Image: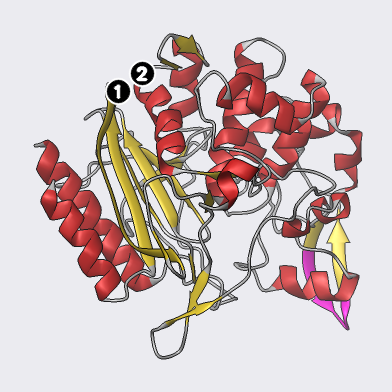
Amino acid sequence: MTDLDALLEKAVADREAPFLVAMTGNSDGMTWSGAAGQRSPGADATTDTVFRIFSMTKAIGSTAAMILIDRGKLSMDTEVEAVLPDFSRIQVLEGIEGGKPILRAPRTKATVRHLATHTSGFVYEFWNSMIPSYMEIAGHPTIISGLNASLHYPLAFDPGERWDYGIGIDWLGKVVEAVDGRSIDRFCHDEIFGPLSMPDTGFEVSAAMKDRLASVRARGEDGSFVDFELSPPANPEFYGMGHALYSTAPDYLRFLRMFLNRGELDGQRILSEGALDHMLANQIGDLRVGLMKTVAPPVTADTEFFPGREKTHSFGFMRMEEDVPGMRRAGSQSWAGVLNSHFWFDPKTDVAGLIMTQMLPFADPAFIRLYERFEAGVYDNAA
């Protein structure tokens, strides 16, 4: 697939990304991999580059909960406060008047399904102007701090009212801990990373991973890239399943291939076939995934994947409800991390793909155009 290799090299040369690692696979294995640029000064990007995968962590957190659902220990309809009584303190933020937040009790009870599908009412401060104002007034820490106090964001709407993107899966990790009894990091290692042979995926940077960890860059006003510091905190009060993991393209491809193989990989079953089908189904009914309008342009651009096309949410991923000509098919699942590490898998065509870097802003328009060309190239080669 020399055309894909050339695409990566040209993208780096054209400053669409500071460096790139990309990989494709199917149910049988990896089908192609490539890398271009320098992951850090003096170190070329390689396919085993270690990434801060941020919100790619969410799919793993949802899978952890689905494992418990599959075992009959939890339900998608379980009310969160029935497992975590502290959740009953969460209120809805209706507005801010005279420098004071106006809060009320939610009209509906948030469930495990709401947490996993971003319909719980939680919205990140990057995509809702009221939330950062509230955080400043209340002295509320960001979820990235790893502090337990950071979980208590107010809701921006009542659970089940709409789709909007926030910290629900951080709470979902707490649900898994409470139901199972193991810490979320131990649960993930025992139930997912170990069985799937993902040695370079973890909540801390191991000695073996340290020299391969990429640097973070941000796009400057002139289009060039400048150094930027952004990482999950080491040894936090809690590991947030919305953002806390480090991983590599080969490891994450194994995770995606488990879904293409109907819940198992290399003889290791993670989910029953029935649970997998339930997990990948539309779990938000008539609601739709839409535009996330930025209120923090240095962190994220306005974000909507495949604008104008029908998108719902499964228990772990954004879900396409229609074919995209020359690209992914209906039923495909995807998401991304804030430093522009993106993935999808397409059960209908047995294709999985990743294209990853470490740069801000998220959904940088030049990077999104690159992602589209890469995906189209993957399907051209698979045809």
Is residue 248 on the magenta stretch?
no
Q: What's drawn in magenta, residue-wise? A: 94-100
Q: How is the image coloured?
A: secondary structure
- Residue 342, above or below 381: below
Side of 234 relative to 257 (left or right): right
Estimate the x, y position of residue 383 in percent, counting from the top left. 8, 37
Answer yes or no: is residue 326 visible: yes
Q: Given the image, on which type of amino acid does mark 1 rest?
A: Ser
Estimate the x, y position of residue 216 in percent, counting from the top left. 53, 67
Is residue 98 on the magenta stretch?
yes
Q: Identify the image quadrant of residue 141.
A: bottom right
Side of 99 relative to 161 (left or right): right
Residue beneath the point at 37% across and 46% down = 47
Answer yes or no: is residue 76 visible: no
Mark identifier at residue 27: 1
Estimate the x, y position of residue 156 in percent, counting from the top left. 71, 59
Side of 142 relative to 259 (left or right): right
Residue underneath mark 2: 261
